[in-house]
Image (tube, rainbow, N blue to C red):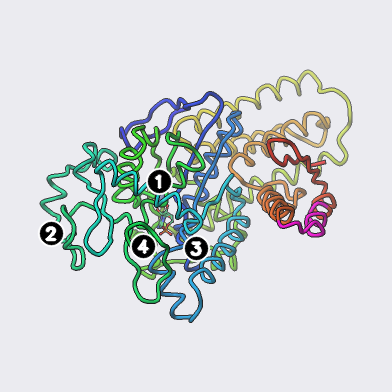
């Protein structure tokens, strides 16, 4: 499997740190509003990468944070006259609903920044102790960028160029910096802001330190893959590398993956520009599976322009697969039992070539556009070769293949399976929380709800496993 690594700007063979395992961190949203479909792009594409790696047999430990302390959250809280955590909790719940509707699997862990302040203080202190950070007069702690020799290695920026253009970076209030490229690790509280005690001042963390700390806590000092949108390459990910590598003396992440922008009229969709559609907006017009299909119809690194025409094309494309599976379900009702005929065996063997075609596309830096073409080719094969005379075993084999490949993309094409994987996992998560809170009535209720849908839960030492009956 090859992955394009932003660090080397090349496709590299993927070799995990530990055989059979993948540790992956994906920068998550700042929760002050409903997520827009630009935010949904990394969720969908990296969920698909995760599903593919799981399909290949890797145990993927997938961590994605919620940034729940931030200027925009505080601003919104002040506007509504509520505590910032009311805002962040509200939009975390809304985000979880959107993810579920997009069939994005919940992460193994979804840490929240406000619950990790202790770890941030620890890492900042160790950076100060190692002379990679300094405390300014007002208690602000800055990272000393020039102390990290490899600064710029991810974004391929030259430090001197950055510095000469740096006057604009030295905005008012930051005169205390020793170098324009130094960035904030901790800052003093302002009136009406949430704050935490620290050795330097009552205040709150800078944004970058969050991810360094959460990645370390849940995945360790060295991880396989760190991912996010390409706007995060500089400064966010560059700063994360500087902090983590200066603090841990280990290479932070081996592979850096970045998705291209979702654009509208060829301009990046963003909240600040106001040119966005929320996932909720889209759900009023389309089944969100169509949005997922639309996102996967382009390579994750390419820019993707959102338009009504492309959404219609995505809808038609997805319909073709769904219709084919519905036809196969219809044929299955009356198909004859028994072994495959010789002709069917030969065809079933031929059909396996589409799995190889799919895998080859995904092995090439998760080329979902080509992978979907393989599904279309398989659908064409099904429409051509599976007729009313086909035996059950053959029909089932072809259907299973289409469903398998679609499932790796997180696309639900068998409408008989009404309950989505992500819904099931979300319910399992809720059940675990109910149990933790000793709300056994709710936990049992969830088990029963799932059982009624034919989902069987098994509590194992590694966690809860589930299967369809
Ligand atoms: P934010 O809430 O702005 O921190 O963004 C959360 C995630 O969404 C990050 O990985 C961003 O890079 C990504 N993102 C934001 N806008 C877009 C966009 N228009 N296209 C693709 N990814 C985006
Ligand atoms: Zn991050």
Name the residue that disc number 3 marks.
35
**Does the magenta segment cover residue 442?**
yes
Q: Give the spatial CA distance, label 4 vs label 2.
A: 32 Å
Q: Is mark 3 within 8 Å of ligand 1?
A: yes
Q: Earlier in the sequence, mark 1 or mark 3?
A: 3
Prevailing secondary structure of the magenta residues: helix
Name the residue that disc number 1 marks.
212
Q: Give the spatial CA distance, label 4 vs label 1.
A: 35 Å
Q: Along the line of sight, which residue is nearer the eye, 389 or 203?
A: 203
Q: Give the spatial CA distance, label 3 vs label 2.
A: 34 Å
Circle nearer the viewer, 4 or 2 = 2
Circle nearer the viewer, 2 or 1 = 1
Q: Earlier in the sequence, mark 3 or mark 2?
A: 3
Q: Earlier in the sequence, mark 2 or mark 1?
A: 2
Query: Relative to 195, is 262 above or below?
Result: above
Going by the picture, which residue comes out furthest to the top?
Answer: 342
**Does the magenta segment cover residue 378?**
no
Name the residue that disc number 2 marks.
167
**Helix, strand or loop at disc 1?**
helix
Name the residue that disc number 4 marks.
265
Q: Position of residue 230 (x, y in %)?
A: 36, 49
Residue at screen point 63% across, 34% down: 378
- Crowding around mark 3 (Cα neighbors within 10 Å: few <14, some 14 to 19, many 20+) is many
Q: Along the line of sight, which residue is nearer the eye, 423 or 444?
A: 444
Q: Which residues are magenta?
A: 437-447
Residue at screen point 51% across, 25% down: 18
Q: Position of residue 370 (x, y in %)?
A: 49, 37
**Helix, strand or loop at disc 3?**
loop
């Amino acid at each position: 499997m090859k992955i394009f690594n932003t660090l080397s700007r090349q496709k590299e063979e993927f070799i995990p740190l530990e055989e059979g395992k993948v540790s992956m961190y994906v920068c998550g949203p700042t929760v002050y509003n409903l997520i827009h479909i630009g935010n949904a792009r990394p969720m969908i594409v990296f969920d698909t990468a995760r599903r593919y790696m799981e399909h290949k047999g890797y145990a993927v430990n997938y961590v994605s944070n919620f940034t729940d302390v931030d200027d925009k959250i505080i601003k919104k809280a002040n506007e509504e006259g509520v505590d910032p955590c009311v805002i962040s909790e509200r939009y975390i719940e809304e985000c979880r609903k959107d993810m579920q509707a997009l069939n994005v699997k919940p992460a193994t862990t979804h840490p929240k920044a406000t619950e990790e302040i202790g770890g941030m203080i620890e890492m900042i202190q160790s950076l100060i102790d190692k002379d990679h950070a300094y405390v300014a007069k007002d208690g602000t702690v800055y990272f000393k960028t020039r102390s990290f020799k490899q600064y710029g290695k991810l974004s391929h920026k030259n430090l001197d160029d950055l510095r000469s253009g740096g006057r604009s970076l030295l905005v008012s209030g930051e005169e205390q910096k020793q170098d324009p490229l130094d960035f904030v690790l901790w800052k003093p509280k302002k009136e009406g802001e949430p704050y935490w005690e620290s050795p330097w001042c009552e205040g709150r963390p800078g944004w970058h330190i969050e991810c360094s700390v959460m990645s370390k806590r849940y995945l360790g000092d060295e991880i396989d893959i760190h991912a996010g949108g390409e706007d995060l390459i500089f400064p966010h990910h560059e700063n994360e590398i500087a902090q983590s590598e200066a603090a841990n003396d280990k290479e932070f992440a081996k592979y850096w993956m970045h998705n291209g922008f979702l654009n509208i009229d060829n301009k990046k969709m963003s909240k600040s520009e106001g040119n966005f559609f929320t996932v909720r907006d889209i759900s009023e017009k389309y089944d969100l599976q169509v949005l997922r299909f639309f996102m996967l119809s382009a390579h994750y690194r390419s820019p993707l322009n959102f338009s009504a025409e492309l959404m219609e094309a995505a809808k038609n494309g997805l319909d073709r697969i769904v219709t084919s599976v519905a036809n196969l379900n219809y044929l299955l009702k009356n198909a004859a039992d028994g072994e495959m005929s010789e002709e069917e065996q030969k065809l079933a063997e031929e059909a396996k070539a589409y799995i190889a075609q799919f895998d080859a596309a995904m092995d090439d830096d998760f080329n979902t556009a080509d992978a979907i073409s393989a599904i279309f080719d398989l659908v064409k094969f099904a429409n051509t070769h599976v007729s009313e005379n086909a035996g059950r075993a053959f029909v089932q084999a072809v259907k299973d293949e289409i469903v398998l490949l679609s499932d790796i993309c997180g696309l639900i094409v068998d409408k008989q399976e009404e309950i989505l994987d992500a819904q099931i996992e979300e319910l399992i998560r809720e059940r675990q929380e109910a149990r933790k809170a000793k709300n056994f009535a709710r936990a049992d209720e969830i088990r029963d709800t799932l059982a009624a849908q034919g989902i069987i839960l098994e509590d194992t030492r590694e966690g809860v496993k589930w299967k369809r009956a």
